[in-house]
Amino acid sequence: ADPHDLFEQHPDVVLLSTSILSTETLLQKLPFQRLRRNTLFVDVLSVKEFPRNLFLKYLPPDFDILCTHPMFGPESGKTSWAGLPFVYDKVRIGDEESRIKRCDNFLDIFEKEGCRMVEMSCMEHDKYAAGSQFVTHTMGRVLEKFGLESSPINTKGYETLLNLVENTKGDSFDLYYGLFMYNQNALEQLERLDMAFESIKKDLFGRLHQVYRKQLFGDNNGEVEKKRSLAQQLLGNGSLTEPPLDNVRQDGS
């Protein structure tokens, strides 16, 4: 309950399991002077460049730093951790054999549980996580607001969507906001999702427009449209402002 009492015990490893939004406030309050100068600090945040930079900013320069992300939670990892990815970056580990061994011993805890150990830089993690974890959380929250409900005729694909909503709605909005706010790649992914949705709408409404035109003008109009399209190709620029089809001469001018 009291970090002063804890740090006076001189723990070998200090593991921070905080929310993304509270990490900096917590670090500012810790009495580092009560720890040994070679203490190992570890985090388990879902973003990695953010805690890395905070550790480098606030921790004494002699402290070791290991940034990790167990990429599973209470739902996905409730039965087993076997095969689930555990990402880590040895940001700053001292050259002494004892400090190297201490870091390895910590990582062995997760490896012995069957985790798939993935070593990569914090920057790489955030790039990949924005394209997977953030997008997953976004789609889960969108579908939750959409009001996805089970039905008597659920398909396998629909069950997958229901499971996605179930897995993401249990996480706090603060976590989701942290994934967005403290990963510089998240905004780009959000904009790509928006563009993809608009593109699909455009394709659907474009096809619907063609159906309505056929109903209004009949199949002959469809033939006219085909000829107009061919003429545009012959003109070479695909513009919608070419002369009427009747004015197109045999030489394509």
Image (cartoon, helix red, strand yellow):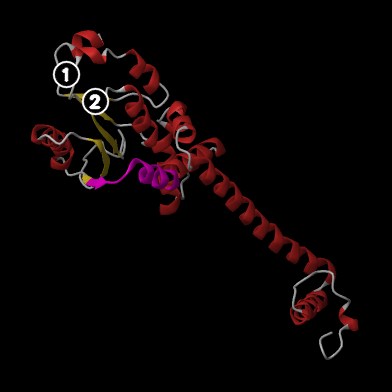
Q: Nearer the viewer, mark 1 or mark 2?
A: 1
Badge 1 marks a residue whose secondary structure is loop
> Observer-nearest residue: 4 or 33?
33
Say few, some or many: other residues with alpha carbon within 10 Å of mark 2 (under 14 / 14 to 19 / 20 or more).
few
Q: Secondary structure at mark 2?
A: strand
Where the C terminus falls, by quadrant? Answer: bottom right
Answer above or below: position of 169 versus 227. above
* Amino acid at dot 1: Arg
**Residue 240 rendering spot, x and y as whole percentages:** 81, 69
Q: Residues within 10 Å of mark 1 (few under 14, many from 20)?
A: some
Span colored in magenta: 117-131
Q: Amino acid at mark 2?
A: Leu
Q: Which residue is mark 2?
A: 15
Tell me what residue is drawn at x 82 percent, y 75 percent: 221
Q: Is residue 138 left or right of residue 60?
A: right
Q: CA distance from mark 1 to mark 2?
A: 15 Å
Q: Is residue 214 left or right of residue 202?
A: right
Q: Earlier in the sequence, mark 1 or mark 2?
A: 2
Main SS of the magenta part reads helix
**Quadrant (top left/top right/bottom left/bottom right) for the N terminus:** top left
| Label at residue 177 | none
Q: Mark 1 highlights which residue?
A: 36
- Quarter of the view holding residue 6: top left
Task: State the residue lying farthest toward the right.
Answer: 247
